[in-house]
Amino acid sequence: MSEAILCYIYRSERKADTYLYLLEKDDFSKVPEELLQVFGDAEFSFQFELTADRSLAKEDSAVVYENLRTKGFHLQLAADLLIEQQLALKNLN
């Protein structure tokens, strides 16, 4: 079982169903500036304790956990944005 970490979730006011997970409340210092510009204004939604094996509705908790531990943030994209991103990457290859 992994160690629990407290994470803070922010909703994008610009992009529907797009969320940013942070390790520290209101600390966007580890999020790339380009991402913040696209994300737009961040509205705090909620906080919770996360472990790598906790069940999450739309994300793989192990991926979220690892991104928070290694990058300091995790971006959850809306399903349609994720599909567009994957198609764009396939077209580049």
Image (cartoon, rainbow, N blue to C red):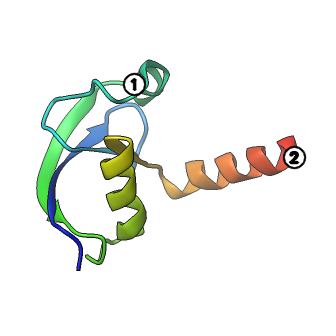
Question: Where the N terminus falls, by quadrant?
Answer: bottom left
Residue 74 x, y percent position in the rendering = 37, 47
Q: Is residue 16 above or below residue 56?
A: above
Q: Secondary structure at mark 1?
A: helix
Residue 15 x, y percent position in the rendering = 43, 37
| Residue 93, numbered label | 2
Q: Secondary structure at mark 2?
A: loop
| Residue 81 appearing in the image | yes
| Residue 36, numbered label | 1
Residue 27 x, y percent position in the rendering = 19, 29
Q: Is residue 23 left or right of residue 18?
A: left
**Structural crowding at the residue carrying mark 2, measured as other residues with C-alpha within 10 Å and reported as few (<14), some (14–19) or many (≥20):** few
Residue located at (20% from left, 44% from top)? 23
Q: Is residue 76 left or right of residue 81?
A: left
Q: Quadrant of residue 88?
A: top right
- The type of residue carrying mark 2 is Asn
Q: Is residue 46 above or below residue 52?
A: above
- The type of residue carrying mark 1 is Leu
